[in-house]
Image (spheres, rainbow, N blue to C red):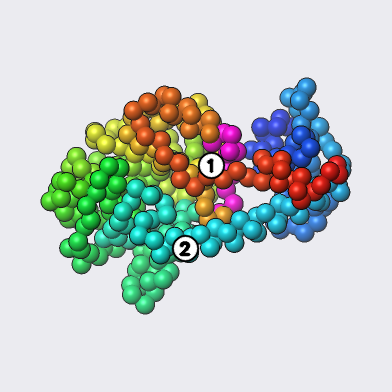
Amino acid sequence: MVMHTEGLTTTELIYEGFIPLLYNNIVYYVNIDEEYQSIEAKTNAYTHNPSSSRPLKIRNWNTLCQLYDLFIQNRKEKREQNHKESISSESKKRGNMYMDSILQWNVGVGCFFRCKYCVLSFQAQMKRQKHNCIKCYNYEPHFHPERLDRKLPKTSGDEFIWAFSSADISFMKKKWVNQVIEKIRENPEKTFFFQTKNPKCFEKYSFPNNLLLGITLETNKEDYYKKARISKAPLPHKRVKDFISIDHPHKCITIEPILQFDLDMMLKYCLQIHPERIYMGYDSKNSFLREPTYYEFQELKKGLEEALPKCKVKTKFIKKDFWEDQTTLTKFIGGNK
């Protein structure tokens, strides 16, 4: 990858795709691109000087090659581990996205937002339906009225029944959604959940109080969101604006898969919505997204808990990447610089 990197700050380097690699208390910034096989041919590396705001260029190729091998090995192991975990979780009664979800009620299926991470999760799961429903297989928005009459479990505490769990309801016809809402009204003792990336669609409906409304808010950094083509859904600021306008007492925010963000802006977005719950988590499907560090993740969590004391901030899939773990690097590389 040919990039102009001279003069960039460390923050800018990370934003441009450079990976911070901690080794012997030195942070190496390495730009790794899968399409290249030789690290010498593709890597610009920098080390951070604590006394300066600018990173300094280094040329220690032996160490960098070892770091690169570690990066590839770690990524492969994580991919295999996550694949095994996703297969195992499918056999469990509870969904692996929300532990509070005791039933994923797929009365409607499908979405055309084409989110990068969804291809490896919800859409991948629907590929098992090829011989049952070709529309499910193709993730084409459609309705299954026969599922309206299924027996619904009791909910307690924070538990909920996730309606349209393999769909975005903004692609569901109004008459379909109203049929589900009517079923929800018939079960006032149970809690239900709707989620969308286009909360503008909520304006068309009158919701009962036993329904939790949610949006996905992965980041506030829209330049990367657009450049990386994360999703065709409305941009984060538009979701926040539209969700604020929805008058409903029970709101929820899902920050998963979390992407790199600006702390102040993410806190501002969440405060404006006044949610009663926030779910946070990393990408569990190895979609190769630009994610915050473990420290940044914890800083956002702490900030939300302090700013929204009545809101339940729940963490889901959390990971500390290998370059944030000094022990792991020492184990693989030894003491050689």
88 lies left or right of 40: left
Mark number displayed over residue 323: none
Query: Which residue, as the protein is rendered here, is positioned at the far left?
Result: 186
Taking the spot 75% from the left edge, 36% from the top edge, the residue there is: 27
Vertical position of residue 153 compared to residue 271: above or below? below
Residue 296 lies within the magenta run: yes
Taking the view exactly as shown, the residue that stands out farthest to the top is 51
Label 2 is placed on what type of residue?
Ser
The amino acid type, in three-letter code, at marker 1 is Leu
> Which is more N-terminal, label 2 or label 1?
2
Please tell me whether residue 234 is drawn above or below residue 302 in the rendered image. Answer: below
List the residue tagged with mark 1: 259
Q: CA distance from mark 1 to mark 2?
A: 26 Å
Q: Residue at x 76, y 45 (%)?
A: 330
Q: Is residue 269 above or below residue 215?
A: above
Q: Position of residue 302 (x, y in %)?
A: 48, 29
Name the secondary structure under disc 1. loop
The residue at which mark 2 appears reads as 88
Q: Circle 2 — which element?
A: helix
Most common secondary structure along the magenta stretch: loop
